[in-house]
Amino acid sequence: MNDASRAEVAIVAVAELFRGDGEQLVSPMGLVPSLGARLARLTFEPELLLSDGEAYLLDAGGVVEGWQPFRKMLEVIVPHGRRHVVMGANQIDRYGNQNISAIGDHARPAKQLLGVRGAPGNTVNHRTSYWVPRHSRRVFVPSVDVVSGVGYDNAAKAGPSAQRFHDVHRVVTNLGVFDFGGADHAMRAVSLHPGVSSGEVAEATSFDIELDGAGVTRQPCPEELRLIREVLDPSGSRDREVRS
């Protein structure tokens, strides 16, 4: 019997984002993305390059194994599609546009957030995925208030130069895993986490989302559970971010 928590299922789902990436720089932002990336490095993707988000490359245990000066990253890695970022999203729409800047009218927002930060460059220069710990209608909206990360519709409007490395890959939430393989790159469900129903996802999403054909997100194997519980997160911080 697998007793994996929802948080542990989500960590494995994030780890699976990096399957096949090989020797590529990954920049996971936040607890669950970091745990997922480190789990992938410890298991099926040992050649991943893990960034600390500042100046160093780390192994799965957090030990520095290389120097990554920011200038060189911008010159050599970012513009050439050799990076996979996992970002958060305060809002995301059916075509993968993401907002981390402001809620409401940009000229006079109801809530000021981080600002667009590196989201535009991330989404047009290399693969980008998103992690949303609480799947809700406030996050999954018909149209984002500010385009921070560029979705498929806006990349198409910008032309071939914006589409060369544009690759909004997946969205992982506390309810499931989603991609943009629907009509005109609309969001669709790839898998729902164990115990989650399609009705639950539909109720938590403000736009029509394709749910037919969604599988069940795989659960951690015993070795993955051991690594998560004993090596990567023995304090159980994951369960404070994602509740079962």
Image: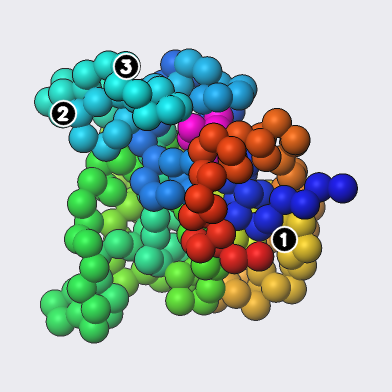
| Residue under the image location 43 percent in, 28 percent down | 61
Name the quarter where the C terminus is drawn. bottom right
Of 200 and 207, which appears nearest the observer? Answer: 200
| Residue under the image location 74 percent in, 73 percent down | 199
Of 147 and 24, which appears nearest the observer? Answer: 24
Question: Which sits earlier in the primary sequence, circle 1 or circle 2?
Answer: 2
Here the colouring is rainbow
Read off the magenta span: 36-40
**From the viewer's perspective, is residue 168 above or below residue 131?**
above
* Crowding near the residue tagged with mark 3, few <14, some 14–19, many ≥20 C-alpha atoms within 10 Å: few
| Residue under the image location 24 percent in, 83 percent down | 110
Q: Amino acid at mark 1?
A: Leu
Where is residue 63 shown, x and y percent of the image? 35, 23
Q: Which mark is residue 211?
A: 1
The mark total stands at 3
Could you tell me what secondary structure mostly forms the magenta stretch? helix
Separation of marks 3 and 2 at Cα, in angstroms: 16 Å
Residue behind mark 2: 70
Where is residue 146 shown, x and y percent of the image? 28, 66
Q: Please give left or right for residue 69 compared with residue 19 in the image.
A: left
Where is residue 238 shown, x and y percent of the image? 52, 54
| Residue under the image location 55 percent in, 24 percent down | 42
Where is residue 76 shown, x and y percent of the image? 22, 19
Of 23 and 153, which appears nearest the observer? Answer: 23
Q: Amino acid at mark 2?
A: Phe
Separation of marks 1 and 2 at Cα, in angstroms: 40 Å
Mark 1–mark 2 CB contact (< 8 Å): no
Please identify, in this view, whether the residue under mark 1 or under mark 2 is nearer the observer. 2
Q: In what element is the residue under mark 3? A: strand
Please identify, in this view, whether the residue under mark 3 or under mark 2 is nearer the observer. 3
The answer to whether residue 169 shows anywhere in this view is no
Residue behind mark 3: 65
